[in-house]
């Protein structure tokens, strides 16, 4: 056993023999760390997370999550992770609460605990009553918040959050950020992908700047800014690549 | 294998069916409406327990030599409760009534009708002495039932007229033992009912396929696989939910039919067993379709490739002796077995029923297993 929650060695993912989405990625995430993946569209963030969570098979390389190999022991990994996919994936005909509880049942959490935790998550993510409306009638931001809640129902040790706050209003985004900081206090490991500079700067202890499937720079946000004499991580990215991470919203 | 997961999948399946109006329509409303429609069209409901066919008789022999014979024939026709006889005097009016569907048949009694019967009784054994005439009958070509049922009723009345009502009085070495169709016996609905019971679950193929593609499109199937769930657990939950649905559908159809006066000969419990087995094949087709389809539209399209043959070749839509093609669809066997049980009153242990059951089981299990493998396959590369 290592101290690392996630350990990735020489990870390569090539789609259809032509698109290299992840290009020889090496990465260690410490237990209890909030680790950010920052990079432009198509950099390979989602692909990496899909491999870490066992959804995608790597082309080559080794990935150990929570001490388990993703290829040999994907079932063990599923028990200790929570994943918030980039595209909200929920049952429209179920209520927000029912969606959270459904996934709780798939994790075989005791009924009583599911109920408690669902209530807690709904409260934390600013749902008052709307939790019992059907998801298909939700606003985009509400869907996103339930999407995050589902990822956390099993109180996972390692959480993958793929662009969790896209499309949320500032209040909801703050609620999710607070939540992520709470996770840190409970010694949970969080891997967060984002292209919100502010999000990465505020939350992450270390940021891996990823471009074309490679980590081109890695470090604490403040240290990176110092190193490149930049005001923001955006400037850091520009200094390295000559490009912007994203268009301003 | 965890009961908690399977239970969650079952409940999710029921929510999906109950909360989507389109699904609910397909699963419950459609079979109910269909049963009602068939009941009103072909059953006893709406006609106080019996079908009555209106028939106009034109008596062309009223001024003939022996008008009592034609009048006797008309009174014999009138005695049949299934017939409502009007005596008309204008063939043209009667023919146009027939074309407009106001009546089911026109009988034209020709001149010399009475002479013909008289000549027969005078020389019963010498046909060369008979006066031969033809009674012209036109049927409503728009009604299959009228053209099939009425000739025998008319024949009976004619027979009664010539020989008297008690046909046993004439001593012939052979008598026909078959009872003629009477209105209070089987209705057309009775013939259609077995197919109707099989019909409802055929559409599960479509609702399942759409459910799966929807879950693929929304990413929830993928998300389920981010938890420790196994595809077997999804499969079992889905199968339990849908088999239950098939049983409920059949019960609803049966109840509707019962309310409308349908009384099968027996074998009800076994009928449910047959439908349960049959539903496995529908579920299998649904899984295959769901695995092949990329979106809900495609799922609807592909599922009809399975639904249409099952419907047209194997349920009430298909009447008459089965052809090789009929024998290719599983629904044929469930309808056939149900027909033996419910219509003919065959015992469960009869060879016909057991043979159907055996073939149905093989079909259903094979299709279901193919479906399970197809589903497992897509679960691997979502
Ligand atoms: N299933 C797939 N088949 C083929 N190519 C793919 C597939 N999934 C991703 N890619 C390609 O891999 C590359 C990385 O995509 P990925 O979704 O990982 O980017 P990302 O960093 O998450 O981007 P975004 O910020 O837009 O979410 C892209 O070029 C994408 O087109
Ligand atoms: Mg992405």
Image (tube, coloured by chain):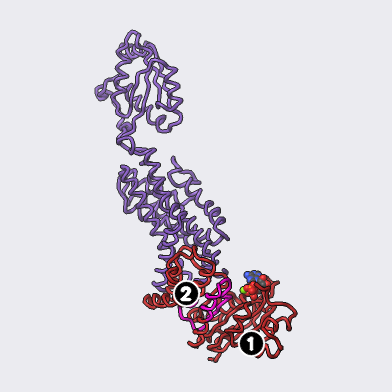
Chain colours: A red, B purple
Whole-number angstrom distance, CA of label 2 to CA of label 1: 29 Å
Q: Camera-side residue: B34 or A207?
A: A207
Quarter of the image where the C terminus of chain A is located: bottom right
* Disc 2 and disc 1 on one polypeptide chain: yes
Q: Say left or right for A123 vs A190.
A: left
Q: Say left or right for B50 vs B200.
A: left
Q: Camera-side residue: B1 or B45?
A: B45
Tell me the residue that label 1 is attached to.
A221
Q: Chain of mark 1?
A: A
Q: Quadrant of residue A50?
A: bottom right
Q: Say left or right for A245 vs B3.
A: right
Q: Quadrant of ligand 2?
A: bottom right
Determine which of the numbered discs, if any, sits on residue A126 in the image.
2
Q: Earlier in the sequence, mark 2 or mark 1?
A: 2
Q: Quadrant of residue A13?
A: bottom right
Decide if residue A167 is in sight here.
Answer: yes
Asked whether disc 2 touches disc 1, contact meaning CB atoms under 8 Å apart, the reply is no
Q: Residue at x 30, y 23 (%)?
A: B78
Percent x, y for residue A129?
Answer: 42, 69
Percent x, y for residue A63?
Answer: 59, 83
Percent x, y for residue B132?
Answer: 39, 14
Q: Secondary structure at mark 2?
A: loop
Percent x, y for residue B331?
Answer: 44, 50
Decide if residue B130 is in sight here.
Answer: no
Q: Residue at x 57, y 68 (%)?
A: B382
Q: Is residue B151 magenta?
A: no
Range drawn in magenta: A149-177
Q: Residue at x 43, y 32 (%)?
A: B143
Q: Residue at x 30, y 26 (%)?
A: B80
């Amino acid at each position: 056993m290592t101290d690392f929650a996630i350990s990735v060695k020489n990870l390569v993912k090539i789609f259809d023999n032509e698109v290299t989405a992840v290009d020889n990625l090496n990465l260690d995430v410490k237990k209890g760390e909030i680790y950010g993946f920052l990079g432009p569209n198509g950099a390979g963030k989602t692909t990496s997370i899909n491999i870490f969570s066992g959804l995608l098979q790597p082309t080559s390389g080794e990935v150990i999550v929570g001490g388990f190999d993703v290829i040999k022991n994907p079932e063990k990994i599923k028990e200790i992770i929570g994943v918030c996919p980039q595209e909200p994936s929920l049952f429209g005909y179920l209520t927000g609460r029912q969606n959270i509880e459904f996934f709780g049942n798939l994790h075989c959490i005791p009924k009583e605990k599911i109920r408690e935790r669902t209530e807690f998550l709904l409260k934390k993510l600013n749902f008052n009553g709307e939790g019992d409306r059907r998801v298909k009638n939700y606003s985009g931001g509400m869907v996103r918040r339930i999407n995050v809640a589902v990822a956390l129902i099993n109180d996972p040790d390692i959480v993958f959050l793929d662009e969790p706050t896209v499309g949320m209003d500032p209040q909801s985004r703050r609620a999710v950020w607070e939540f992520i900081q709470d996770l840190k206090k409970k010694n949970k490991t969080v891997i967060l992908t984002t292209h919100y500079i502010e999000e990465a700067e505020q939350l992450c202890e270390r940021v891996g700047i990823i471009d074309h499937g490679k980590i081109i720079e890695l470090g604490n946000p403040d240290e990176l800014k110092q190193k490149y004499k930049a005001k923001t991580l955006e400037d850091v990215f520009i200094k390295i690549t000559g490009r912007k991470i994203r268009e301003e919203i | 294998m965890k009961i908690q997961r399977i239970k969650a999948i079952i409940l999710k399946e029921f929510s999906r069916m109950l909360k989507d109006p389109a699904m609910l329509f397909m699963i419950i409303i459609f079979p109910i409406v269909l049963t009602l429609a068939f009941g009103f069209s072909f059953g006893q409901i709406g006609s106080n327990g019996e079908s009555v066919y209106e028939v106009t008789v034109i008596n062309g022999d009223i001024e003939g030599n022996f008008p009592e014979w034609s009048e006797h024939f008309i009174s014999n026709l009138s005695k049949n409760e299934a017939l409502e006889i009007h005596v008309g005097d204008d063939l043209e009016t009667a023919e146009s009534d027939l074309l407009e569907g106001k009546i089911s048949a026109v009988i034209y009694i020709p001149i010399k009708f009475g002479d013909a019967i008289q000549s027969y009784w005078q020389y019963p054994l010498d046909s060369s002495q008979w006066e031969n005439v033809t009674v012209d009958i036109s049927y409503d070509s728009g009604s299959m039932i009228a053209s099939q049922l009425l000739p025998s009723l008319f024949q009976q009345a004619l027979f009664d007229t010539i020989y008297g009502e008690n046909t046993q009085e004439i001593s012939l070495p052979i008598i026909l033992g078959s009872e003629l169709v009477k209105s209070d016996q089987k209705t057309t609905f009775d013939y259609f009912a077995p197919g109707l019971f099989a019909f409802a679950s055929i559409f599960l193929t479509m609702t399942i396929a759409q459910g799966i593609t929807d879950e693929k499109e929304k990413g929830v199937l993928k998300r389920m696989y981010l938890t420790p769930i196994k595809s077997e657990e999804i499969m079992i939950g889905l199968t339990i939910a849908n088999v239950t649905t098939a049983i409920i559908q059949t019960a609803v159809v049966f109840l509707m039919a019962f309310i409308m006066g349908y009384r099968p000969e027996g074998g009800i419990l076994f009928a449910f067993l047959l439908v349960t087995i049959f539903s496995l094949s529908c579920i299998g087709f649904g899984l295959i379709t769901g695995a092949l389809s990329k979106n809900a539209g495609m799922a609807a399209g592909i599922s009809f490739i399975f639904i249409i043959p099952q419907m047209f070749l194997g349920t009430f839509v298909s009447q008459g002796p089965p052809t090789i093609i009929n024998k290719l669809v599983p629904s044929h066997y469930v309808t056939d077995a149900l027909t033996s049980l419910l219509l003919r009153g065959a015992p469960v242990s009869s060879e016909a029923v057991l043979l159907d059951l055996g073939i149905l089981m093989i079909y259903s299990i094979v299709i279901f297993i193919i479906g399970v493998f197809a589903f497992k396959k897509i679960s691997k590369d979502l």
